[in-house]
Image: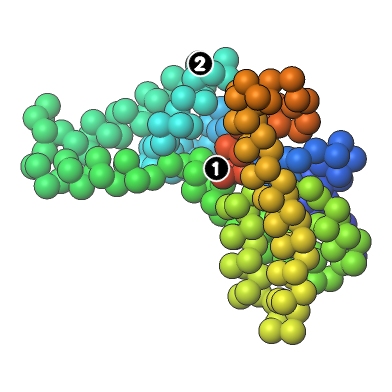
């Protein structure tokens, strides 16, 4: 299967974790990179585009992405975006310097609390990544081997891949896809359970002289597995 702009990032994410023999979920790292690029864009060239500014004025950003934007050292672009966002909000929430009716105010603020420009962009591209990965598995034997060669797929991405696969693959293909995905998910899950248990035992004096084996970072890996947080950041 020839590589395209849609398949290259997925292949690269798998190549990285396999070459490094990393326990990181390749899809977690894809999401991390997607978020990094979206924040870079919104605080860069996209910030000055009028149509983008209209969207950010309306959607705003979730607390997490506001926090991440403030740590990127681009305070002026963020301030310019906040200026127009605040002015738009003030216009929709006040009339002659007096708050609009309670219903209107609660509705607009409620809309704002449930929306985020970066989250919306990430969700759009994330669905494409899941669908593309399933398609690659169905068309490319090389990618099938990469999937089976990964050490870990976290709980969220396992669930989402199964959901997408069940919809987009034939009834004949899906059981094989589920088996390949399960051959990565289940063994690592079992290993993680054992590593966390051993980590706990190491705090029992009876085991203090025993080796740590692979359990020193078990807590961090368990959190990554359960919450889909990449094990390393940019």
Residue 55 spot, x, y in % from top left = 43, 43
- Which tag, 1 or 2, sits closer to the chain's start? 2
Relative placement, left or right, of 167 versus 19 is left
In the current view of this chain or complex, which residue is farthest to the front? 206
Which coloring applies here? rainbow
Identify which residue is drawn at 67% across, 50% down: 189
Placement of the C terminus among the 4 image quadrants: top right
Give the number of callouts: 2
Question: Dot 2, crowdedness within 10 Å: few (<14), some or many (≥20)?
Answer: few
Name the mark on residue 75.
2
Secondary structure of the residue carrying numbered label 1: helix
Residues at discs 1 and 2 in contact (Cβ within 8 Å): no
Placement of the N terminus among the 4 image quadrants: bottom right
Front residue of this view, candidates 173 and 191: 191
Residue 135 visible (yes or no) = no
Secondary structure of the residue carrying numbered label 2: helix
Identify which residue is drawn at 80% across, 38% down: 22
Q: Kindly indicate the quadrant of the structure image that contains residue 187.
A: bottom right
- Residue that label 1 marks: 227
Residue 203 spot, x, y in % from top left = 60, 23
Q: Kindly indicate the quadrant of the structure image that contains residue 112.
A: top left
Name the mark on residue 148.
none
**Above or below 114: residue 132:** below
Relative placement, left or right, of 228 versus 214 is left
Q: How far apart are labels 1 and 2 at the CA level?
A: 30 Å
Front residue of this view, candidates 230 and 224: 224
Question: Dot 1, crowdedness within 10 Å: few (<14), some or many (≥20)?
Answer: few
Q: Nearer the viewer, mark 1 or mark 2?
A: 1
Residue 63 visible (yes or no) = yes
Identify which residue is drawn at 71% across, 69% down: 178
């Amino acid at each position: 299967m020839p590589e395209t702009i849609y398949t290259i990032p997925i292949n690269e994410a798998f190549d990285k974790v396999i070459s490094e023999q990393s326990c990181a979920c390749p899809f977690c790292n894809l999401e991390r990179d997607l978020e990094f690029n979206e924040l870079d864009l919104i605080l860069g060239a996209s910030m000055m585009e009028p149509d983008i500014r209209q969207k950010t004025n309306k959607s705003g950003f979730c607390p997490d992405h506001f926090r991440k934007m403030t740590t990127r050292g681009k305070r002026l672009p963020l301030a310019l975006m906040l200026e127009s966002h605040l002015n738009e909000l003030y216009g929709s929430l006040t009339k002659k310097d007096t708050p609009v009716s309670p219903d209107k105010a609660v509705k607009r603020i409620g809309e704002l609390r449930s929306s985020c420009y970066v989250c919306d962009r990430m969700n759009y591209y994330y669905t494409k990544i899941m669908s593309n990965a399933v398609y690659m598995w169905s068309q490319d034997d090389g990618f099938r081997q990469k999937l089976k060669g990964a050490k870990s797929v976290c709980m969220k991405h396992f669930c989402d891949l199964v959901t997408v696969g069940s919809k987009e693959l034939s009834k004949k293909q899906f059981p094989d896809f589920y088996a390949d995905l399960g051959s990565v998910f289940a063994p690592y899950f079992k290993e993680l359970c054992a590593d966390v248990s051993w980590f706990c035992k190491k705090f029992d004096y009876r085991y203090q002289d025993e080796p740590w084996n692979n359990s020193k970072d078990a807590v961090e890996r368990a959190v990554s597995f359960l919450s889909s947080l990449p094990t390393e950041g940019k």
